[in-house]
Amino acid sequence: MTGYGAFVKKEFMEFYRSHKLLIILAVFLLLGMMNPLTAKITPQLVENFMPEGMIVNLGEPTAFDSWMQFYKNVPQLGLVVLVILFSGMMSQEYSKGTLINMLTKGLARRSVILSKLTVALVMWTAAYVICTGISWAYTAYFWKGEILHDLFSAAVLVWIYGILLLAVGLFGSVLCKNAYGNLLITGGFVGVQFLLNIIPDAIKYNPLALVSRNMELIEGSLKFEELLFPIAVSAGLAIAFVIAACAVFNRKTL
């Protein structure tokens, strides 16, 4: 565990020195503020920019609109940034050859994988909590007293899906020696999920439901229990990808 702890510290320092910490916090901080603000000002912007004489009645924005922006922007923008930032988890180690000395000095290969996963999970969790907390605070300020269902459950689903993408990315970074191959693997994994939605029997197991059915939870038309299958599949796949990453790395020649 000493090697694991030292490598975790090294990964945090590299994440800080490469400015990736600043990038991920800035992006999710911006997303957290942008979601409720966009919902608040969109009707006014549409009204101001419409041609004279044309009237479009969008209605008064609500807290529901704010969270709709959240579950559109975070999966489409936030998760993309997350995947890109961590796409080179192993490629830099391969290109620089920094792992050879550490492994010959007794560092367990699984410690390398688990330390990189630990840092990725901590950074993703911290950024996502900040984003969600800011969105919640602004939404509560703009729309006092509005009650919505299962806000916490809906938010947790996106967090779980982010973990799944990090696990896939970790496996891809071990398998490929460059970030582009990793991005192709992660993109292909997401693409397969979209294709699975074509099959009616596969929809209730598809992890994609964790980032596509959140608003149904909030509006009360979907029960959390109906998403237990996608959650279980996501958790199982994440564990399987981490185990596969360890197995491949154990056999990989540096």
Image (cartoon, rainbow, N blue to C red):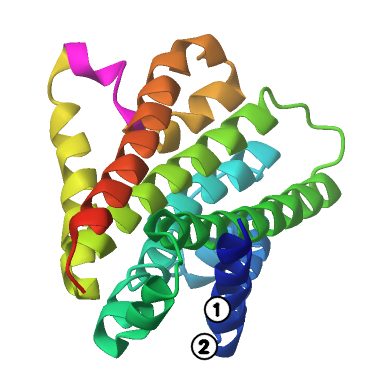
189 vs 240: above or below: below
Q: Residue at x 40, y 43 (%)?
A: 164
110 vs 116: above or below: above
Residue 204 part of the magenta segment: yes
Q: Position of residue 69 (x, y in %)?
A: 53, 50
Q: Residue at x 51, y 88 (%)?
A: 18
Locate residue 146 relative to residue 222 in the image: left or right.
right
Q: Quick one: SS at disc 2? A: loop
Q: Check disc 1 and give the amino acid type.
A: Phe
Closer to the camera in the image, 244 or 153: 244
Q: Is residue 55 visible?
A: no
Q: Locate the C terminus and report the quarter of the image it occupies.
A: bottom left
Q: Is residue 134 visible?
A: yes
Q: Kindly indicate the quadrant of the structure image that contains residue 59.
A: top right
Residue on which the image places disc 2 = 18
Locate residue 171 relative to residue 117 in the image: left or right.
left
Q: Position of residue 185 (x, y in %)?
A: 18, 55
Residue on which the image places disc 1 = 15
Q: Which mark is residue 145?
A: none
- Mark 1 crowd level (few <14, some 14–19, many ≥20, 10 Å Cα): some
Cβ–Cβ below 8 Å for labels 1 and 2?
Answer: yes
Q: Position of residue 153 (x, y in %)?
A: 62, 28
Residue range highlighted in magenta: 201-207
Give the CA separation, mark 1 to mark 2. Answer: 5 Å
Q: Check disc 2 and give the amino acid type.
A: Ser
Closer to the camera in the image, 11 or 61: 11
Q: Quick one: SS at disc 1? A: helix
Closer to the camera in the image, 100 or 137: 100
